[in-house]
Amino acid sequence: MSINYSEKIPNNVDLANDKTLQRALEHWQPRFLDWWREMGPNDFASADVYLRTAVGVDAQGWANYGTVKMPDYRWGIFLADPTPDRTIGFGDSFGQPVWQQVPGEFRSQFRRLIVTQGDTEPASVEQQHRLGHTCPSLYDLRNLFQINVEEGRHLWAMVYLLHAYFGRDGREEAEELLARHSGDVDKPRILGTFNEPISDWLSFLCFTYFTDRDGKFQLKSLAESSFDPLARTCRFMLTEEAHHMFVGETGLARVVKRTLEVMKETGTDDPEAIRRQGAVDLPLLQRYLNFWFSSSLDLFGSEVSSNAASSFANGIKGRPDETTQYQDHVCAEANRELDLPDGQGGLKKETVGMRNAMNEVLREAYVKDCEIGLKRWNMQIKRAGYGFELKLPSNRFRRAIGAWTNVPTDLDGKVIGREEFDRRLPDWTPSASDRTYVKSLMQRVAEPGRMAGWIAPPDRGINNLAVDYEYVRLA
Ligand SMILES: [Fe+2]
Ligand SMILES: [Fe+2]
């Protein structure tokens, strides 16, 4: 199904044939644009940005590149093509035909999931609202804006589902998605991580590496859903999402590269000496990784969850790559052993039904995926001849959701005393002085091809263009 760009709302869902839905969404559209103008990267509304826009939904050649002013970006509704005769891939209804409508008994569960996913999309745009002012290069500025417009598009994706399948409740939820704001005291975004402001680029790169990757895993498990329109929506979102994680992974690799250059030049790995040269010392990077990894782990929810169990049983949310990665798609009998805190400073083993452990299954798949970047960065460090190794902290470290909430542990997950934890935390997560230092690095570099001193240039430009292409023309 090709995308129709001649309509007010570009789409490949034949919107013109459903006048009621079309009118409702056309009513929501100006509100979205108001939100974008107010909460998006509004100081750059008149800049010309080299952006990609979806033109199709198949993996090859799905995007078009061109210069666009962000408020003119064509946000629309794009679903991956249906899989003929698709059947339910997991849970109690395994093997039955997928649903084209939401079954009444699962309506509120689906609605909550879609709203929670939808809420994160505009939240991240709000978190990054002022970041453009301190861009390390025009290449990076363009990537930030690409991500921002696509998160806006992901909001459209969820709002389409709410409008099309949830009637009046859905329309109300769509309004609320524009009314909550990241960090707002009265009406915050739903999930904690999405209320943390992202005011420096090191945080942004960690966010795209760790938090967007949570998004990838949530989308992957919703792409397995028995509710076919949701599955198709998420499948196409994943195509867009890949670039967001690319920005995080290559961005952090460029930070490491620059630091290694400075270490070579100065002949020392002393953090103070590295900082005098305006680069990010590796222990500082490690503390940023610890912070963002642990806060992103919370997004997967509690280790033991009856909600997760019923989502799986009811065919609402599967596991990432359900068909290819798992043998048992029903998991009615299977068990899972978990290490949980025993409340006395130790560990206890607990066996729970596999369905109840689904959050943990997802979290483990996520952690494995996170390891890939660390391996690459460590390879860079090793090749440069240094012994420093970046590491992910234990899943138990600094958790605010689930069994490990408020259980003080060290980076290896060993339970320690509260006092020791408080004393050592500034060595483990960015301290106030770390943040001040990182903030001092955030000086805007906006000449084509030039990079800030704390990050190396990328290996290549966007869409085969040169690195020194003028990716954003600031007005
Ligand atoms: Fe997204
Ligand atoms: Fe994203």
Image (cartoon, rainbow, N blue to C red):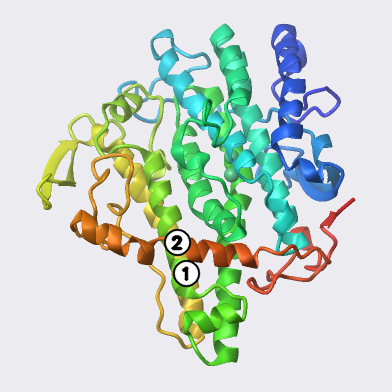
Residue 403 falls left or right of residue 235: left
Q: Residue at x 35, y 26 (%)?
A: 311
Label pair 2/1, CB-CB below 8 angstroms: yes
Residue 91 x, y percent position in the rendering: 32, 26
Q: Is mark 1 on a helix, strand or loop?
A: helix
**In percent of the image, x 29 and y 37: which residue is there?**
302
| Rendering coords of residue 171 (x, y %) | 61, 13
Work out which quarter of the rendered image holds the N terminus and state it.
top right
- Is residue 422 or residue 267 the one in the foreground? 422
Q: In this view, does 285 lie above or below 67?
A: below
Extreme-right residue of the structure? 475
Dot 2 falls on a residue whose secondary structure is loop
Is 109 positioned to the left or the right of 3 in the image?
left
Question: Which residue matches tag 2?
Answer: 430
Left/right placement of residue 47 relative to residue 21 reads right
| Residue 85 in sight in this render | no
Q: What residue type is labelled 1?
A: Leu
Image quarter for ligand 2: top right
Q: Distance between the residues labelled 2 and 1?
A: 7 Å
In front: 225, or 211? 211
At x 37%, y 49%, the residue is 365
Q: Which amino acid does label 2 sit on?
A: Pro
Question: Quadrant of residue 338 in the image?
Answer: top left
Q: How crowded is mark 1: few (under 14 residues within 10 Å), some or many (20 or more)?
A: many
Which of the two discs, 2 and 1, labels the residue nearer the N terminus?
A: 1
Q: Name the residue that disc number 1 marks.
A: 284
Q: Is residue 221 above or below residue 364?
A: above
